[in-house]
Amino acid sequence: MKKIQTYGKVFFRYLSLSTMYNATYREGFFIALGVEIFYAVTSIVFFNILFGSIKSFAGWSYWEVLLLVGIDTIMSELLVGLVFANGTNVLPRLIKTGNVDYFLLKPIPSYFLLNLAQPYFPSVLSTLFGFILISISLSHLAIAFSFVTIVGVLIMMVSGFIIASSIMIMVASLAFIFSYSNTFPRIGMNLTINFSDKPHHVYNSLVLKSVFYFIIPAIFLSSVPAYSIMHGIDSPFFLSAIGLAVVFSLLSFTVWNYMISNYTSASS
């Protein structure tokens, strides 16, 4: 519990600093906020164009897809704000300059300090747009979900976040060996976010199911939680989400520590 409290204090301290920084440079903050919301708007525009020609997409209605987009907006913005923007994205630069050494010497695990402890406030705030989309979609859908369903969906969303962030961290950690490859963090992000805003029913072949259900299980980030809100918790999906979260988190810790063991300080 003491470690969790310490991690929490570090996280909220960085969040406070991020908030103060953005309050100082307000123009840049509103531009960054607009950019984050723009990505969600492009998804809405795409599906509006798509539903102009069809009545359903992979068996999903327009309002069901809007619910998916809302959840995906929340999850993708949390991934960008809590993991990517000030974490995995800047890791190659810290390694090249040798500044990563200061993080490795601190009495807090580098896995947390370099990847999860430095939130990007505009992205975190942009999740509000996702909640608005969810509210609009639910007002058009006749859904009666229970407390158990809500808890189950939240557990799957947390599991999806753990899976996606673990993939991002594993890919970004390759920079410890290939220090001049700035593209690794973005590859990790694209492997998860770019495939999470579509209904999982579009991945209907055996190959696609193998990839997006188990190897790069992006469906658990947004699609499966959205589907569970509409149709109830599916036990195989629920157990798979938790199991994959455990597997990928352990795998990311192992890969991260191995990459650091092969790291040679740029300042040495």
Image (spheres, rainbow, N blue to C red):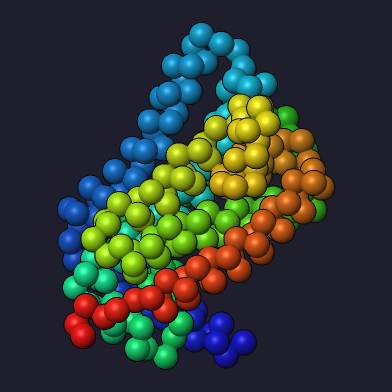
Q: Above or below — where is 26 with respect to 250?
A: above
Report which quarter residue 223 is drawn in.
top right
User: Relative to 206, is 136 on the left or the right?
Assistant: left
Q: Above or below — where is 213 with respect to 64?
A: below
User: Relative to 61, is 89 on the left or the right?
Assistant: left
- Residue 9 visible in the displayed image: no
Report which quarter residue 207 is drawn in.
top right
Q: Above or below — where is 217 with respect to 118?
A: above
Q: Choose between 231 and 193: the one closer to the eye.
A: 193
Q: Choose between 105 and 206: the one closer to the eye.
A: 206
Q: Residue at x 69, y 37 (%)?
A: 227
Q: Position of residue 41 (x, y in %)?
A: 39, 33
Q: Position of residue 29 (x, y in %)?
A: 24, 55
- Residue 170 visible in the displayed image: yes
Report which quarter residue 91 is drawn in.
bottom left
Quadrant (top left/top right/bottom left/bottom right) for the N terminus: bottom right
Q: Residue at x 61, y 33 (%)?
A: 208
User: Relative to 91, is 160 on the left or the right?
Assistant: right
Q: Residue at x 20, y 57 (%)?
A: 26
Q: Position of residue 179 (x, y in %)?
A: 27, 65
Q: Position of residue 54 (x, y in %)?
A: 56, 11
Quadrant (top left/top right/bottom left/bottom right) for the C terminus: bottom left
Q: How many numbered badges does the structure rendering display?
A: 0
